[in-house]
Amino acid sequence: MASGLRWMRPPPAQAVRTALWVLAVVILVSILYATAHRVTLKPADPLSPYLWTATLASAMTAVLGALAAFEIGQPGHSRWWPLLPMPALALWFAATGFGCIGTLFAPNSWGVVAPEAMECLLFILGTAVPLSVGLLTLIRWAKPRHPTLVGAIGGLAVAATAVSLLTLVHPHNSALLDILAHGVGVAVVVAANVALAGRWSRNRMATL
C-alpha cells in the first residue's frame, strides 16, 4: 500500500508565507509610488491624523489578516485566529469614519461626486486581482479544510491592502460617497475570494 503513496512537499511556514505576501505588496507599493504622480488626479490635501491612522490600521489589517488566513489553513488551528485582524479592522473603520466627518463641511473634497468615487472602486478591484491570485495560491498550497473561512479572512487582507495602496494615489480623507465605494469594493473582494477558495476546494475534492 505504501508504494502508491506520493511524497508531498510541506507548505512553507505561515510566517514565511506572510513574508512572501508582504514582499509582493512592497513590490507593488514601489511600482505605485514610482508612478503615483501620473495617476493622482487632484493635489494632495494636508495629511490628517485620521488619514494616517486609517492607512496604518488598514495595513495592519492586511498583514494580520494574511497571517490569520495562513494559520486557519493549517490542521488543528485555534478558533481564535479569525479574530486576529479584527482590532485593526475596527480602528481602520473608525478612523475612516471620523475623517469622513471633516469632508461634510468641505464640498471640494475628493469623492463627493460619483465619477471620483467610481475611480476609487475600480482601483480597489483592479489592485485586488493580482493580490488575490497571489494570496490564494499560497493558501491553496496548504490545502485548507475550511476554505470559506480562509477565503473570507484572506479576502479581507486583500481588500485592506488595496485600500492602503489607494492612499498613494488618493491621499485624502474620504467623502461619504467615497466611503460607500470603498465598502462596495471590500465586500466584492471578500465575496470573490470566498467563492474562489470554495471552488478550488471543490475541484481538489473532485480529483481525490
Image: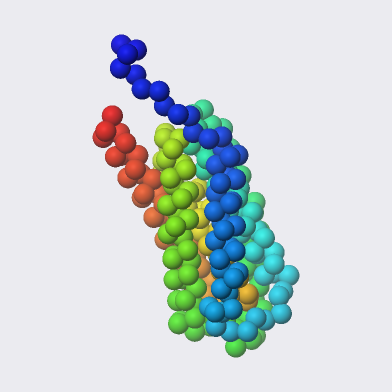
Q: Is residue 97 above or below residue 78?
A: below
Q: Is residue 188 above or below residue 118?
A: above
Residue at (39%, 55%) from the top-left corner? 192
Picture quadrant where residue 187 is located: bottom left
Residue 133 x/y as whole percent: 42, 52
Residue 85 x/y as whole percent: 60, 49
Quadrant (top left, top right, bottom left, bottom right) of the N terminus = top left
Residue 195 x/y as whole percent: 36, 50
Residue 18 x/y as whole percent: 57, 44
Q: Is residue 126 visible?
A: yes
Quadrant (top left, top right, bottom left, bottom right) of the C terminus = top left
Q: Is residue 158 above or below residue 13?
A: below
The residue sitting at the top extreme is 1
The residue sitting at the right extreme is 49
Number of numbered discs visible in the structure rendering:
0
Picture quadrant where residue 179 is located: bottom right
In the picture provided, is 16 more to the left or to the right than 129? right
Q: Is residue 164 visible?
A: no
Residue at (44%, 38%) from the top-left corner? 141
- Image color mode: rainbow
Residue at (26%, 33%) from the top-left corner? 207
In the picture provided, is 75 more to the left or to the right than 96? left
Picture quadrant where residue 41 is located: bottom right
The residue sitting at the bottom extreme is 108
